[in-house]
Image: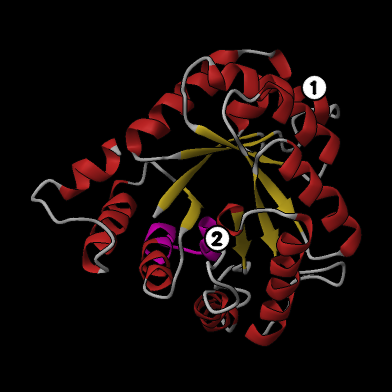
Amino acid sequence: MIIIGERINGMFNDIKKAIQEKDPKPVQEWAVKQKEGGAEMLDLNVGPAVPDKVEALKWLVEVTQEATDLTLCLDSTNFKAIEEGLKVCKLPAVINSTSAEREKIEIAFPLAIKYNAGLIGLTMDKSGIPKDADTRLSFAMELVAAADEFGLPMEDLYIDPLILPANVAQDHGPEVIKTLRQIKNLSDPAPKTVLGLSNVSQGCSNRSLLNRVFLAMGMANGLDAVIADANDEALIEVAAAGEVLLNQSVYCDSFVKMFKQR
């Protein structure tokens, strides 16, 4: 299970202020803290902090890399900002994200190949997020076909079947689980799967519990990565235990510690 730390995001007030004032300290503190928590990647998202997304994302990449050597996941709807960020990445990054719309596919896939980056593909188009697993899967198939068309290695494609909050879209949960399971049958090798895990609990009470349970459910059905709170100790414990119980990592008495240090 790949944990992608979600905290360096301009939606959070401390990161928003840091971006506006170009203060690297909060960004770098969260980079280190998330790595210590168990993150293998860090999601970087300017959010609503400043209008100039291009320079802001580039700055985020540069200051984050001063504090950590983790893989970076560049999260933006602005492909120009993503490319400027990719130019200064020291290691191959992940682009977050593209929908299954053809015009976006034709930008995102060549960009990923140019910079040797991974790519997150969303199972949606301009009409929005589908309700049922079959429609989600059809978008996933388009993304897999695009990877083959443009030459993106399948192991570099992450498909996100898009979970919505349980308090407003409770019926989507089983459809996402079904989609996760079916994505693994689309190709050999299969693409990776990813979820913005915290979305399932947005606006709900007892958010951490919902996140942890859905993580366990997802892992049992082929989920490979989550953008999540890397400093939720119990969430990390679920991920570590899930790997052991699914025979994805070798058991040892310190399996949680080993997961964090990996």
What SS does tag 2 mark? strand
Give the residue drawn at x 70%, y 14%: 21
Q: Is residue 56 left or right of residue 89?
A: right
Q: Residue furthest right?
A: 103
> Which is more toward the observer, 26 or 142?
142
Most extreme residue toward the left, as rendered?
253
The answer to whether 176 is drawn above or below residue 153 in the figure is: below
Where residue 70 sits: x, y (%)? 47, 31
The spot of residue 149 in percent (x, y) is: 78, 62
Percent x, y for residue 225? 47, 56
Question: Quick one: label 1 or label 2, which is nearer the N terminus?
Answer: 1
Left/right placement of residue 259 relative to residue 48 reads left
Q: Quadrant of the C terminus?
A: top left
Residue span colored magenta = 196-211
Cβ atoms at labels 1 and 2 below 8 Å apart: no
| Residue kind at label 2, given as amino acid type | Leu
Q: Which residue is mark 1?
A: 55
Q: Which mark is residue 195?
A: 2
Residue drawn at x 42%, y 75% is 221
Examine the image and state in which quarter residue 258 appears: top left
Say what secondary structure mark 1 lies in: helix
Report the number of discs. Answer: 2
Query: Dividing the picture into quarters, in which one does residue 102 lie?
Result: bottom right
The residue that appears at 44% across and 59% down in the rendered structure is: 207
Give the quarter of the figure containing the N terminus: bottom left
Q: Predominant secondary structure in magenta?
A: helix
At x 74% / y 72%, what residue is drawn?
Answer: 129
Question: Was residue 205 drawn as part of the magenta stretch in this picture?
Answer: yes
In space, the residues marked 1 and 2 are separated at their CA atoms by 27 Å
Amino acid marked by disc 1: Glu
